Image: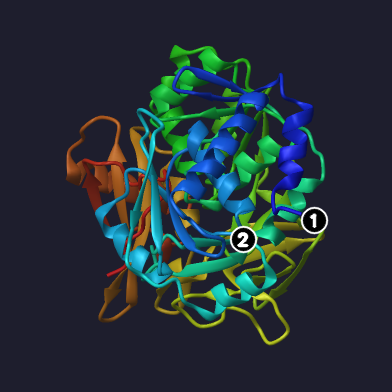
Amino acid sequence: MMNAQFLIDAFKESSNNLAIVWNGKEVKYGGLLKAIQQANDFLSENQILSGQVIALKGDFTPNTISLLIALINNRNIIVPFNNPMKDSEEVKFEIAKVQKTISVNLDTDQCKVENTGFDGDHEYYTSLRNLGVSGLVLFSSGTSGFPKAAVHNFQKLLKKFKTSRKSLRTINFLLFDHWGGLNTLLHTLSNCGVVLALYNRKPDFVCKFVQENKVELLPVSPSFLNLMILSETYKKYDLSSLKLISYGTEPMPETTLKRAKGLFPNVKFQQTYGLIELGVLRSKSKSDDSLWVKLGGEGYDLRVVDNMLQIKAESAILGYLNASSPFTEDGYFITGDQVEVDGEYYKILGRKSELINVGGDKVYPQEVENVILQMDNVMEVTIFGQKHAIMGNIVCAKVLLKEKEDKKVFSRRLKEFCKGKLQSFKVPVKIENEEEVLHSHRFKKTRKFD
């Protein structure tokens, strides 16, 4: 049986239902089946053989989606990239040993193939070929160092989508090269829902898109949700169709979550948790405005060691192409996330690598950011550590303001505001006013450590 045959079978049963809305174009599941057959022909015509390592550059366009499914069924090892790519990402071609690249034009949805010259040779790839299954290579964000290439048996990731679940009219907000984005796509398609594909992820466009397409599910990052609220773009549009806002990829500031729930009282908020090394776990928030979440589901086993979350998963990666094994001797993945535990619920405090050690005292950036976001005139804030000869590190803040304010006046105001809410060693010592946004193109907070 083909790797994604269960998707093909589901599409046949829903051939008259709407599948994809992209760039004003609607594609039904019957049309998607035809596009997948055309993608199969495209692979054959361009001599893309089973087992080859193929980079797929695109977004959630009909042809990109069709090619993804065709490549899965062709048992290729797929390396997804966004199109256009950042120049710095081309080094990933060499790391992944990509043999051919399929690029999908975001305006015309047309495809072209290019040879790369790499040999597609690695022991993990050999293992996948011997099993006769497709593979998936995902890259870490590289925010804490060089990006790592994680190799999956795609068949194991697809297994959970064979269980039928409820599907809503869903925006594919998270990017194509991000497992969160692929997870959203595959969940929606496997349940024959409607994939609403964005080609602009700025708050104003997203809110307009929600209104025009009666979006029910909006999966976002906390940074995006914060920007949407503080920029007040939501006021310009009718967002009453929204039933669920899910959030993940980074810790959510409690301030942002409470503001969001207050503004959208009829919308359910759900925290998600996933890693490129494991996939996305099933999750259940304690309440809409709570950061406590129950994690797990079939195929996952969780434990906490030294306040750090460890997870064993059936869908775990084979390993990294360019780094040592991330697993303990008994098969648990060390997530790097510091957590608190309350019975069945977990609270994600932040990455251990982002902790700031000030004279032996630990500072979680998230805690400080949550306080500063309560201040008037603050749009975004990022807390990071800077080395210090005496204290080891000091706490620093980069702040984007809604309106310009005298730097010295604002610095004094921030420190005074924090003094009554944070211990003294957590109050930022160095404060920088920024002119640009403090998140990446993925709407994920960026941190700098000197």
Q: Position of residue 353 (x, y in %)?
A: 46, 71
Q: How is the image coloured?
A: rainbow
Quarter of the view holding residue 89:
bottom left
Residue ID at (39%, 34%): 110
Q: What residue would you read off at disc 1?
A: 297
Marker disc for residue 134: 2
User: Label 2 sits on what residue type?
Assistant: Ser
Q: Secondary structure at mark 2?
A: loop
* Viewer-nearest of discs 1 and 2: 2
Return the x and y of residue 288 as percentages of the image width and height: 69, 36
Q: Is residue 73 above or below residue 53?
A: above
Tell which of 261 and 281 is nearer to you.
281
Residue at far bottom of view = 329
Q: Quadrant of the C terminus?
A: bottom left
- Residue 299 occupies quadrant: bottom right
Res. 146 in view: yes
Residue density around tag 2, few if under 14, some if 14–19, many if 20 or more, within 10 Å: many
Q: Quadrant of residue 356?
A: bottom left
Task: Assess whether mark 2 and mark 1 are in contact (beta carbons under 8 angstroms).
Answer: no
Q: Amino acid at mark 1?
A: Gly
SS for dot 1: loop
Q: Residue at x 37, y 33 (%)?
A: 106
- Residue at x 60% of width, y 45% of height: 69
When the figure is inspected, residue 34 is found, relative to residue 177, above or below; the finding is: above
In the foreground, 341 or 204: 204
Measured along the vertical axis of the image, is residue 22 above or below residue 291?
above
**Can I make out residue 286 in this image?**
no
In depth, the one of 40 and 88 nearer the eye is: 40
Q: Nearer the viewer, residue 392 or 185?
A: 185
Residue 142 placed where, x, y %? 39, 64
